[in-house]
Image (tube, rainbow, N blue to C red):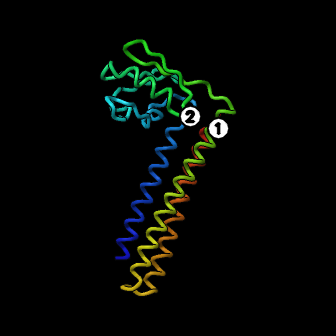
Amino acid sequence: MISDVLAEATDKMNRAVEVAKDDFSTVRTGRANPALFLKIMVEYYGTPTPLAQLASLQNPEARTLIVTPYDKTALKEIEKAIVAFPNLGATPTNDGNIIRVTMPELTEERRKEYVKIVRAKGEEAKVAIRNVRRKAKDDLDALSKEVGEDDISRAEKELDALTKSHVDGIDDALKRKEAELLEV
């Protein structure tokens, strides 16, 4: 029972770290990376649909990305979604067949802005991990009637170590991303 609670907490914490790393990859560095566009949701026939399901993304140059929709009727909606996506700063141009997205040069001010965004995403991930810890601790406390206090105490120490290791993993990923963003 205790092992089930800890295994579930570990799984959820691992997913929180992976989501944080995915979020970090959506914040751009010097190149136009197709991963930046993976979280863009396009209104397609009244349903929010991920851009990657509606179009292919190609990166011919460092600051240019070509979006080729599978359905040409979605061009306008894709263009609107790219413009509306926060913190991208991209300027899409539509030629009727494809959308060419040009990313602006990164200024020092913009880089610092991106660092703030990444830190906020990192903090959200840490909060998610702490919430998983809180739920697991509540589950362990509920088991205290069936299991001895020593076992619960040991499990809580293990849970704290798990939490610390996952928070450290987010901190490490955050440091790498900050260094990547501030590198000129």
Element under disc 1: helix
- Left or right? Give the position of 96 relative to 28: left
Where residue 71 appears, as percent x and y from the top left, is 30, 22
Q: CA distance from mark 1 to mark 2?
A: 9 Å
Badge 1, how many Cα within 10 Å: few under 14, some, many 20+?
some
Quadrant of the image for the N terminus? bottom left
Depicted 167 relative to depicted 119: above or below: below
Depicted 140 relative to depicted 37: above or below: below
Q: Are marks 1 and 2 in contact (CB under 8 Å)?
A: yes
Q: Type of residue at label 2? A: Asn
Q: Which residue is mark 2?
A: 87
Q: Type of residue at label 1? A: Glu
Q: Quadrant of residue 105?
A: top right
- Left or right? Give the position of 67 relative to 104: left
- Left or right? Give the position of 121 relative to 140: right
Where residue 142 appears, as percent x and y from the top left, is 40, 78
Instruction: Tell me the number on the disc at residue 113.
Output: 1
Residue beneath the point at 53% across and 25% down: 90
Front one among 20 and 141: 141
Depicted 58 relative to depicted 141: above or below: above
Residue beneath the point at 38% across and 71% down: 5
Please report whichever mark, 1 or 2, sits nearer to the chain's N-terminal start.
Answer: 2
The total of numbered circles placed on residues is 2
